[in-house]
Image: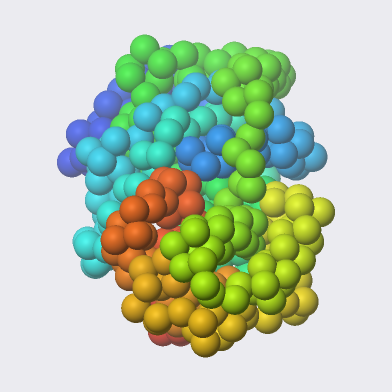
Amino acid sequence: MSHADDDFTRYEDDLDFTVGVRVMRAATGAAAREVLASTAVLVLPPLSLATRRTPVALEWLDAHGFSVEYAHTVRLTDDRIHRMWKYQIADDGADRIRLVSRLLTYGPSLLLAVVGPVRDGIPVATRLCELKGHADPDRTAPHHLRHHLGAANMFNNFVHMPDGPPELLREAAVMLPEQELLTLWNRARDARSGPQARGREDALSLTPATGLPEGVSLAHVAVSLRRSLLERIRVSVPTADLAEAERLTAAEAAWTAGRAPDRPVEVLAEFRSRFRPVYPLLRRELDPSEPLLTVFAEAEGALFAADFDPERMSDAAEKAGITLGTRDAIVFDTEWLSLSLRSRHLNSVKQI
């Protein structure tokens, strides 16, 4: 997005934008244009925070010359999500909107405000947005923030940031109450005399001490689920010969246990090169309509990028008396939607 003044007129009737402009000007006065140009906001969504990506993000920001001046946890509700992306979601299907809502309301998010130098007249918010990388981790480069964070797929990609200064003003006003918004701009203004990194320790203190086991790695989550399903199947159908399937899934589990879940794309690619589907062995022993076997087949379909349907998985799990955790459901659902988009050759994905 261009940072010309004309860009600000697109939101002139937007209430959140109006509030954002008013609070920013109250805090920065005559320096408003300069402070706005040198400030950016990024949001680490719930699963980014829950998997302790904060230290990784701070390391990347430091290396790229951005100083964290403000940190605050925010709860993204359906209303806030709609207000933030109302100009982008008009053409999105209901399933996609529900998935994004589930992903972003999983828990608290962490909002960081950073300052940095304006280069070649490009505002920091615009420059940082370009540096975050594409929504699809397969299309990011090593210097991009999403690559550095270990994004899993087009939706579980660990960071959101406004496209430029107009969006920064509007989205920050959606996420923060006015007093916190005023604090953000006061700190950005104070950083004109030199970055103070006043939000760095706050960001670390607001991050969980331990991260979610298995992170958002599809390989880790699906392997673990299939192992637990085999245990249930053995109890439900004691006559079935599961020895070979158990041997193979034990090898998978041993392998994933030796791989850190914080590089989910790389781990999944290596898993697919090393292992083969187990479901054909079970299909010979069990009735394909068995709900436990259906859940196993769907999880395996996700693992090997074959045909799978998270709704079918959820229905079968319910019939089998299994409750899929919210994190696990998000991992499968986001992978399914990412695969669906790729299969339709959609090269341009709106970023969250």
- Pinpoint residue 90: horizontal percent, then vertical percent: 22, 61
Residue extending furthest front? 239
Q: Is residue 94 visible?
A: yes
In depth, the one of 64 and 109 nearer the eye is 109
Please determine whether, in this image, residue 314 is positioned above or below residue 183: below
Q: Nearer the viewer, residue 314 or 6?
A: 314
In the depicted view, which residue is nearer to us: 178 or 186?
178
The spot of residue 138 in percent (x, y) is: 63, 70
Instruction: Work out whether 112 lies above or below 281.
Output: above
Residue drawn 36% across the image and 68% down it? 291
Image location (x, y in percent) of residue 173: 34, 29
At a point 77% along the width and 76% down the height, the residue shown is 274
Asked if one can make out residue 339 in the rendered structure from this viewpoint, the answer is no
Q: Viewer-proximal residue, 26 or 309?
A: 309
Residue occupying image coordinates x 52% and y 72%: 239
Q: What colour scheme was applied to this rendering of the protein? A: rainbow
In the image: residue 312, left or right of residue 45:
left
Q: Please name the residue shown 56% across and 35% down the image.
A: 49
Could you say which quadrant of the image residue 280 lies in? bottom right
- In the rendered view, does 112 fall on the left or right side of 317? right
User: Residue 136: x, y in percent?
Assistant: 55, 66
